[in-house]
Image (spheres, coloured by chain):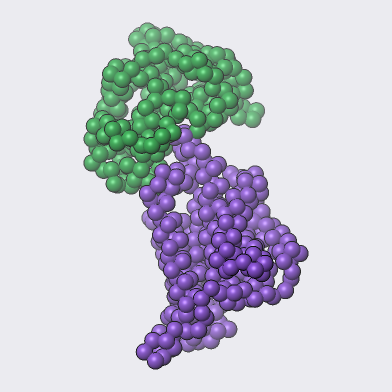
């Protein structure tokens, strides 16, 4: 589905990603794990076109993404879901959702709106409220719901657990799992919270200082004590 | 009583023009965080376009439309060609750039249109309307001023609130990166924002010029008043710009009518200082969001 081959990226003299290769398979949750500064966010930003790779290839369902502009991604079926702070706080909940629906190019369909409101009833209840009034968990639901409005085939989730209570994290991860199982969505999940991420993911890739240090099924990674202690912090 | 009414009516008409000019500043500030000092000479340029059309023997209205359309084009071209390279750079770059544009447009206008005063026609009578035997300080052109500014504002509100393009423009103004991730062509939205702002500024230019004299520098004093009006309203809020314009127009009219017209500019600066001291975010500032 999504394949990175020998990807290198950086900022000025700093190298953030070095020779990163990984594959996120269709209908699976692939977790990218690692400490702060391991290159996780750069990886997502490079895939979604916010940052340009220095070299290497990004292939999404046969389309090469290295030079595709970020604003074209929704039409290709790829949705980069920024962390909860990525809600547009000055717009209402419904305006945020409609904006997501516009990303595909056509008009916003009310069927999509009601589907998202069914998935996240709290968003329907607060549709006219400014997004700035939402709690952290509600914001995270809003960014995911907004991404779904464009009917993507793959979600790139950036730290969905950031700053949220464990109960909310479990709820959101449970929902992502449901989307994958029922809608056949594919997910590339970038997380610092490795324990929660591995509990929901099918496959895991561990980054350290911009390099891939492990790439294995999620349960295998979770069972590798040495790796967990060295890189995952649990 | 009659003097009070007339002063208020004068202030209302004047306030509407300030409101339009402030709105032009706010539209650009909201989307690009640039205070467009070149707004005045841009409006001056398009008003001269109208004058050229009218002097060539065409009707006032053709000149009016030509000015608004050339405003639209001028705004878009300036954003694409001149402003785009400094967007996202240090703020001082944009400030110096728009000041430079100010000087360049001034100079060009003096060369192209002549550095002299020329009279500009008005489409409606400039004689005060008569109500119950007394003449009031509101003429046909004044009514046209008020109506046209209100109409443009209503159209802009409708555009921002109820259309997909308006939603995309607001998203681009508030958060460019997220807007891009959602498929919004942010660059086009910024161009459109400048074009619309320039159109509204052109309207203000035409309304000030109507029945009066135009000169390459005739809009310059309006920059100060328009800026004060925009700051009064909080720079970020279109509604604030309108209210700010009206408050300023009325205040200055009363200062001029009851205190002395030589104090108008001073009064504008006093109002600016008071607002910046008491409510630095403007009258319409929303409480800043708490960052968590």
The quadrant where residue B243 appears? bottom left
| Quarter of the image where the N terminus of chain A is located | top left
x and y percentages locating residue A138 in the rendered image: 30, 37
B264, above or below B168, in the image: below
Spot the residue most to the bottom. B133
Q: Which of B106 and B289 is in front in this view?
A: B106
Q: Which residue is drawn at 59% across and 17% down?
A: A56
Percent x, y of residue B215: 67, 71
Residue drawn where x is 30% and y is 27% of the image: A172
Q: The purple chain is which one?
A: B
Left or right, B26 with reference to A224: right
- Chain painted in green in the figure: A
Query: For this rendering, which residue is in front, B33 or B117?
Result: B117
Expressed as whole percent of the image width and height from the top left, the position of residue B135 reads 44, 88
Viewer-closest of A191 and B135: B135
- Is residue B185 something one can see in this rendering? yes
* Residue B273 against residue B172 in the figure, above or below: below
The structure residue drawn at horizontal position 41% and vertical position 91%, both measured from the top left corner, is B134
User: In the picture, which quadrant includes the C terminus of chain A?
Assistant: top left
Give the residue displayed 49% in from the left and 41% down from the top.
Answer: B176
Image position of B117 (left or right of A78): right
Position of residue A111 relative to residue B73, above or below, is above
Percent position of residue A154, x then y = 40, 22
Is B111 or B217 nearer to us in this picture?
Answer: B111
């Amino acid at each position: 589905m999504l394949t990175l081959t020998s990807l290198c990226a950086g900022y000025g003299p700093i190298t953030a990603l070095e020779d990163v290769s990984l594959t996120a398979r269709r209908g699976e949750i692939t977790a990218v794990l690692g400490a702060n500064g391991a290159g996780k966010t750069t990886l997502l930003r490079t895939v979604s076109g916010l940052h340009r790779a220095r070299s290497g290839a990004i292939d999404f369902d046969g389309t090469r993404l290295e030079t595709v502009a970020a604003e074209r991604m929704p039409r290709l079926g790829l949705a980069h879901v920024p962390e909860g702070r990525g809600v547009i706080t000055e717009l209402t909940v419904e305006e945020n959702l409609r904006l997501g629906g516009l990303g595909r190019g056509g008009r916003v369909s009310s069927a999509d709106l009601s589907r998202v409101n069914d998935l996240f009833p709290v968003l329907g209840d607060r549709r006219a409220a400014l997004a700035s009034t939402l709690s952290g968990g509600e914001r995270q639901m809003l960014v995911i719901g907004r991404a779904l409005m464009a009917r993507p085939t793959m979600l790139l989730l950036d730290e969905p657990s950031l700053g949220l209570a464990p109960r909310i994290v479990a709820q959101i991860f449970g929902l992502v799992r449901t989307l994958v199982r029922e809608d056949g969505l594919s997910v590339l999940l970038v997380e610092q919270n490795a324990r929660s991420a591995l509990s929901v993911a099918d496959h895991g890739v561990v980054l350290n200082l911009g390099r891939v240090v492990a790439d294995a099924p999620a349960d295998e990674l979770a069972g590798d004590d040495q790796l967990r202690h060295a890189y995952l912090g649990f | 009583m009659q003097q009070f009414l007339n002063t208020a009516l004068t202030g209302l008409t004047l306030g509407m023009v300030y409101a339009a000019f402030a709105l032009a500043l706010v539209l650009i500030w909201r989307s690009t965080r640039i205070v467009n000092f070149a707004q005045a000479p841009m409006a001056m340029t398009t008003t001269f376009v109208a004058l050229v059309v009218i002097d060539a023997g065409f009707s006032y209205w053709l000149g009016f439309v030509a000015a608004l359309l050339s405003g639209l084009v001028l705004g878009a071209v300036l954003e694409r060609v001149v402003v785009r390279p400094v967007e996202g750079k240090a703020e001082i770059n944009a400030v110096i750039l728009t000041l430079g544009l100010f000087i360049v447009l001034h100079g060009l206008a003096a060369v192209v249109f002549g550095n002299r005063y020329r009279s500009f026609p008005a489409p409606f009578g400039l004689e005060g309307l008569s109500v119950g035997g007394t003449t009031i300080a509101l003429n046909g052109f004044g009514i046209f001023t008020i109506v046209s500014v209100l109409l443009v504002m209503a159209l802009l509100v409708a555009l921002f609130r109820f259309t997909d393009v308006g939603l995309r423009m607001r998203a681009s103004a508030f958060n460019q990166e997220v807007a891009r991730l959602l498929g919004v062509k942010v660059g086009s939205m910024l161009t459109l924002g400048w074009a619309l702002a320039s159109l509204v500024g052109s309207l203000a230019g035409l309304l000030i010029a109507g029945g009066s004299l135009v000169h390459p520098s005739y809009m310059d004093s309006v920059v100060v008043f328009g800026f004060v009006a925009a700051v009064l309203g909080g720079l970020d809020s279109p509604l604030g710009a309108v209210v700010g314009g009206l408050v300023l127009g009325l205040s200055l009219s009363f200062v001029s009518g009851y205190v002395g017209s030589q104090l108008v500019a001073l009064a504008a600066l006093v109002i600016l200082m008071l607002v910046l001291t008491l409510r630095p975010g403007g009258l319409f500032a929303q409480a800043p969001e708490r960052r968590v």
